[in-house]
Amino acid sequence: MIGSIFAASAAVLAGPAIGLLGYRQLKRLSNARSLRITDPRGIDESGFVRIGGIDQWISVRGDDRDNPVILEIHGGPGASNHVFLPRTRAWERHFTVVRWDMRGSGRTFAQHGPDGQGEFTLDRLHRDALEVTEHVRARLGVPKVLLVANSFGTLLGLRLARSHPELYSAYVGTDQNIVAGGRETSAHEALLERLRKAGKRKELAEVTAMGSDGTTWTTQQWSAYNKLVITSDPLSYDTMKTVVVRSLWFSPEHTLRGLHAYLKGMTFSERLAREAATIDEWREGTSFAIPFFVFQGAQDVLTPPGAARRFFEDVEAPVKDFALIDDASHFASFRHPGAFLDLLLTRVRPVISHEKARP
């Protein structure tokens, strides 16, 4: 999905190619300077770690090693969060943030290519995530980490939070996905209504013919559906262009070849969609032994807040909280990283600090 939109957006950027590339380089250098961690208490490490039988890319960044540790579970599938480093730099002043390129994404995909990713299932990613968690706990000397999952990563994040409360201080989901075994159809119904209002007869016919049950879709249909959801909603499309595409284009960590590998990884990872479409969050369990938070874009059309709210209301947890981020569709935490950080600091950190202080 992002690959096709990125290509289309890049094609209409103003200016000759040489000027465009020159501006890109200046912007990347500026972003790189903003990412420098100079505090002696800080940490800035990145490299490959042997996880699940293959080398996988992990970065650890923060201004103070004594801050709580976040483990991010990125979305996509296959969409590494490393491109958002400049946008989320402020998070690292309050947390040590661990970002992991899952197999099929980012530098992990680029290192091994499509034939070197090994077993590629949600269960394998779950086992990888547990290995990453254990690596982080040992490397940073912490008993638990704060689990922060976004978009597709929330499917994996919920499973981790349910099954291993001894490893995680709390769960935070944003762009929270709710599949409900194919029963959650509000995003599909809203898309049909937008297409009707816009007079998009061809697209309307295609989406109608697909039906609302994502468990029956092909990978190609899943990709086409997601693209239509994003491009048919002005706020979502604006976020894709101004937040996601700009983050990709100006990422100080990605060369043009690196961006090509990034997008190829997303295409490769789309094969997970059919397996993910069968997940039933209620059947897997609504009981969590750790604090549970959902911070959702108020205008999210891809993972609607209503569906996330319905699941949240059924959750049983020691502490739970739900908040909407205004002027945000999907990618809410990256469109408004300051608002998301404020929620982490005012609602989550006091809870995990209290848990840490308990005997």
Image (cartoon, rainbow, N blue to C red):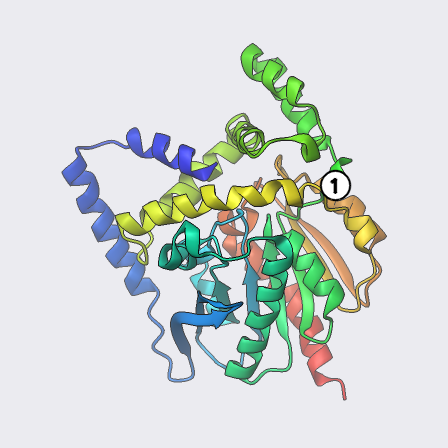
Q: Residue at x 34, y 77 (%)?
A: 38
Q: Is residue 36 above or below residue 154?
A: below
Residue count near mark 1 (Cα–Cα under 10 Å), binned few <14, some 14–19, many ≥20: some
- Total marks in image: 1
Judged from this view, the residue extending furthest toward the left is 18
As shown in the figure, which amino acid type bears the numbered disc 1?
A: Ala
Q: Secondary structure at mark 1?
A: helix
Q: Residue at x 81, y 64 (%)?
A: 317
Q: Quadrant of the C terminus?
A: bottom right
Q: Residue at x 55, y 42 (%)?
A: 271
What x and y, as percent, mark residue 288? 79, 64
| Residue nearest the viewer, comparing 298 with 247 | 247
**Residue 91 at least partly seen:** no
What x and y, as percent, mark residue 321? 75, 58
What x and y, as percent, mark residue 53? 50, 68
Q: Is residue 154 above or below residue 216?
A: below
Quadrant location of residue 133? bottom right
Report the side of 43 relative to 231 (left or right).
Answer: left
The residue beneath circle 1 is: 307
Q: Is residue 70 above or below residue 214?
A: below
What x and y, as percent, mark residue 344? 61, 63
| Residue nearest the viewer, comparing 132 with 31 | 132
Report the side of 137 relative to 93 (left or right).
Answer: right
| Residue nearest the viewer, comparing 105 with 200 | 105
